[in-house]
């Protein structure tokens, strides 16, 4: 039995039996039907699919914030949003508003800018980072696009010489305004104390690369010149079209993604003042406990 079969539930045919389907890229999973109708067992298997396939998409959902949180809490611990830095952009504890729309206090949500939110992953320099991100398209989403890159697929099809250059390397990460976002929300920093292996296995035992390249600031023991040269070569490989999933949003869509072995990008969208997404960050502790 492969890692994927074990985590999905013993057989890949379970996906088809539950009415799921694959996107033409053969790794993104599309789920039909209402989230509210899923059993707890089905929720954990969907969570397992996120860990193995990187991206799971739900269509045509109509969810309350409490229903959103209930689903994510079946996967694992939900990150609180009530602390000082995020409480002003929270819908309620656990849910951030991703929007340029102003609330009754005149506050925009997270990443409300019209310009692209370039390739990134959730809090890459934080060793306690949440590995799953839930995005729910509440309103005004039509015409906007978010893309994901599957770093498991990219690593599998990477030239052997390039793979060898990455093995054993550890990188450090941070944030620089304008590098992937023009948002003033984050503090600029480079965290050289938290080193992460570029080639890694996620909790499902699948190997890929941890490569949010616009948040990478160096590789331990490597010169800046050699670092930049290596990053550019890897970028050329991972940005090939066959490793990407492009999601053209419709209201009611939900996209769940794994944050160790994928990165994502929101493309420029003039409608950001009216587009509202709900964002939840959680871990997969409940899924792991059932394996």
Image (cartoon, helix red, strand yellow):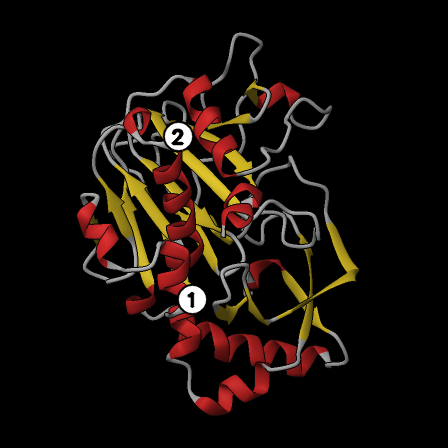
Q: Secondary structure at mark 1?
A: helix
Which residue sits at x=55%, y=68%? 201
Tell me if residue 84 comes above or below residue 118 in the rendering. Answer: above
Tell me the distance, in whole angstroms, between the alpha carbons under discs 2 and 1: 39 Å
Q: Secondary structure at mark 2?
A: loop
Tell me if residue 285 comes above or below residue 39 in the rendering. Answer: below
Which residue sits at x=39%, y=17%? 64
Question: Residue reaching furthest bottom?
Answer: 161
Does residue 186 appear left or right of residue 191 in this picture?
left
Tags 2 and 1 touching, CB below 8 Å: no
Residue 211 on image: x %, y %: 54, 65
Q: Which residue is mark 2?
A: 272
Which residue sits at x=31%, y=29%? 35
How many other residues sit within 10 Å of disc 1, few (<14), some (14-19) or many (≥20)?
few
Residue 287 on image: x %, y %: 50, 45
Question: Residue reaching furthest top?
Answer: 104
Q: Which residue is mark 1?
A: 3
Residue 83 on image: x %, y %: 72, 24
The mark tally for this picture is: 2
Does residue 20 appear left or right of residue 75 in this picture?
left
């Amino acid at each position: 039995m492969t890692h994927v079969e074990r985590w999905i539930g013993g057989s890949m045919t379970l996906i088809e039996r539950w009415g799921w389907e694959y996107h033409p890229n053969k790794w993104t999973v599309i789920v039909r039907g209402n989230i509210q109708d899923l059993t707890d067992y089905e929720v954990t298997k969907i969570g397992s699919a996120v860990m193995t396939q990187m991206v799971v998409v739900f269509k045509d959902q109509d969810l309350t914030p409490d229903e959103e949180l209930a689903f994510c809490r079946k996967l694992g611990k939900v990150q609180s949003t009530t602390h000082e830095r995020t409480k002003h952009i929270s819908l309620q504890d656990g849910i951030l508003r991703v929007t340029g729309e102003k609330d009754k206090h005149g506050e925009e949500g997270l990443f409300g800018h019209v310009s692209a939110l370039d390739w990134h992953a959730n809090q890459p320099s934080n060793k306690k980072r949440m590995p799953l991100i839930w995005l729910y398209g509440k309103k005004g989403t039509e015409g906007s696009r978010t893309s994901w890159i599957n770093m498991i697929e990219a690593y599998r099809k990477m030239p052997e010489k390039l793979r060898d250059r990455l093995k054993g390397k550890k990188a450090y990460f941070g944030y620089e305004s304008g590098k992937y976002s023009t948002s003033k929300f984050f503090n600029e920093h480079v965290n050289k104390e938290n080193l992460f292996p570029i080639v890694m296995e996620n909790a499902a035992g699948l190997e890929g690369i941890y490569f949010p390249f616009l948040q990478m600031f160096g590789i331990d023991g490597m010169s800046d010149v050699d670092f930049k040269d290596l990053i550019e070569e890897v970028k050329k490989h991972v940005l090939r079209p066959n490793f990407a999933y492009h999601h053209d949003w419709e209201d009611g869509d939900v996209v769940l993604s794994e944050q160790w072995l994928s990165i994502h990008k929101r493309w420029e969208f003039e409608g950001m003042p009216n587009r509202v997404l709900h964002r939840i960050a959680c871990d997969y502790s409940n899924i792991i406990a059932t394996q």
